[in-house]
Image (spheres, helix red, strand yellow):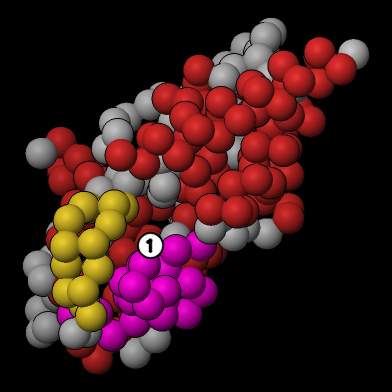
Amino acid sequence: MERGRSRRRHRLAFVLALALAGAAAGAERIELPPGPDRDLVYSRCRTCHDLQSVVDSAGIPAGDWAIVVQDMGRYGLRIPADERGKIVQYLATYLSEAPPKPAPARAPAAAVDGKAEFERQCSACHQAEGQGVPGAFPPLAGNPDLFRDRLFPVRVILKGLQGAITVKGERYSGVMPPFDHLADAEIAAVVNYVRGAWGNAALRPQGFTEIDAADVAGARRQ
């Protein structure tokens, strides 16, 4: 029994080491099996590392996944308990030794709530009021880069962004992963919400129109 617990601890330590090492591996696109809350895993986990370590660790039980996700809090992961539970449930179900058949693709809603989608996908880093985290994640509130050109934030969401940038006089150097797993309508709704929230509407240049799903689809094809 002690030998089994030791193997389990070593395997969990290996998962954590792989996950942290992935931070230096870039934003390589790793596809996870379709299933409920897959988007949550993308948005919360891929912010700091790629997901190859997650795929390579398929088959560990739910209790072990829970330990892995909990231990990530030591390295800065801050998510609500309900989201943590959903992530663990997805990993234990769809990266198990006998995963269920792929779930059907989610159909985009006719009307997407941009605020709700922002809170779900973006607020862990950029914060609920778009204020960001000094030295770590740039603010979106009062950020003129949102209006650099009409499709700039769309391309950032689709392709990600890395390297040094300066926002409101403060320098940031990090990696934002691509969020291209989101539907075109979801990305459009997030961009429109952010451009209108927290006083950002006052920064809108004359003639800037809102983004729609067709705009995002065109940017995705580029």
Main SS of the magenta part reads: loop
The residue that appears at 73% across and 37% down in the rendered structure is 66
Reply yes or no: does residue 137 show up in magenta.
yes
Farthest-out residue, right: 1
**Where does the C terminus fall, quadrant-wise?**
top left
Is residue 153 depicted above or below 94 in this figure? below
Asked if residue 215 shows in the view, the reply is no
| Residue 16, image x, y percentages | 55, 34
**Where does the N terminus fall, quadrant-wise?**
top right
| Residue 32, image x, y percentages | 48, 25
Q: Residues within 10 Å of mark 1 (few under 14, many from 20)?
A: many
- SS of the residue at dot 1? helix
Please state which amino acid type lies under the numbered disc 1.
Val
Is residue 163 depicted above or below 13 in this figure? below
| Residue 162, image x, y percentages | 21, 52
| Residue 185, image x, y percentages | 37, 50
Q: With 173 as the anchor, is 152 left or right in this view?
A: left
Q: Which residues are magenta?
A: 124-144
Asked if residue 177 shows in the view, the reply is yes
The residue that appears at 29% across and 52% down in the rendered structure is 175
Q: With 88 as the anchor, is 147 left or right in this view?
A: left
The residue tagged 1 is 190
